[in-house]
Amino acid sequence: MSKGEPSMPARIKHLGRTDEDGFRVSSLTFIKDKYRSCVAVKIGEDGSVQVRDTKDPTKTTLTYTSEEWVAFIGGVKGGEFDL
């Protein structure tokens, strides 16, 4: 994270809209009140990062530690996952 950049939870709080369960979802996810394929993210009470697919009707949630999430974002920004 660069100097002056908001902390990880602060950045998530500024994403799009909040769904009915408190997950933050990109504003591009909502098209005429129907979900498109996207992920929803929420900070748990313990500081964990909870992620789920907006199209999954069972709302299966994956939970990561803050450190795991920061490492993942670093890998994405660093091109580690480019196919």
Image (cartoon, helix red, strand yellow):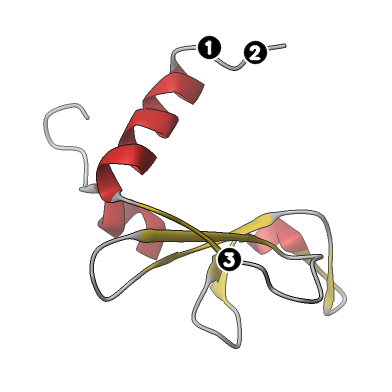
Residue 5 lies, in percent from the top left, at 21, 38
The residue positioned 24% from the left and 63% from the top of the image is: 47
Q: On the rendered image, what quadrant is the N terminus found in?
A: top left
The residue positioned 76% from the left and 76% from the top of the image is: 58
The residue positioned 34% from the left and 39% from the top of the image is: 68
The residue positioned 32% from the left and 60% from the top of the image is: 48
Give yes or no for contact between labels 1 and 2 (Cβ–Cβ under 8 Å). Answer: yes
Residue 70 visible to the viewer: yes
Residue 14 visible to the viewer: no
First-in-chain label (3 vs 1): 3
Q: Which residue is mark 2?
A: 82
Q: Is residue 73 above or below residue 80?
A: below
Q: Quadrant of residue 60?
A: bottom right
Disc 1 element: loop
Q: Is residue 82 above or below residue 54?
A: above
The three-letter amino acid code for the residue at tag 2 is Asp
The three-letter amino acid code for the residue at tag 1 is Gly
Task: Please tell me whether mark 3 or mark 1 is closer to you in this view.
Answer: 3
Comparing 31 with 20, the one in front is 20
The three-letter amino acid code for the residue at tag 3 is Thr
Comparing 37 with 64, the one in front is 64
Separation (CA) of disc 2 from disc 3:
24 Å
Q: Is residue 82 above or below residue 68?
A: above
Answer few, some or many: residues within 10 Å of disc 3's Cα (few below 14, many 20 plus, some between 14 and 19): some
| Numbered mark located on residue 15 in the image | none
Q: Which residue is mark 3?
A: 61
Separation (CA) of disc 1 from disc 2:
5 Å
Residue 18 lies, in percent from the top left, at 54, 77
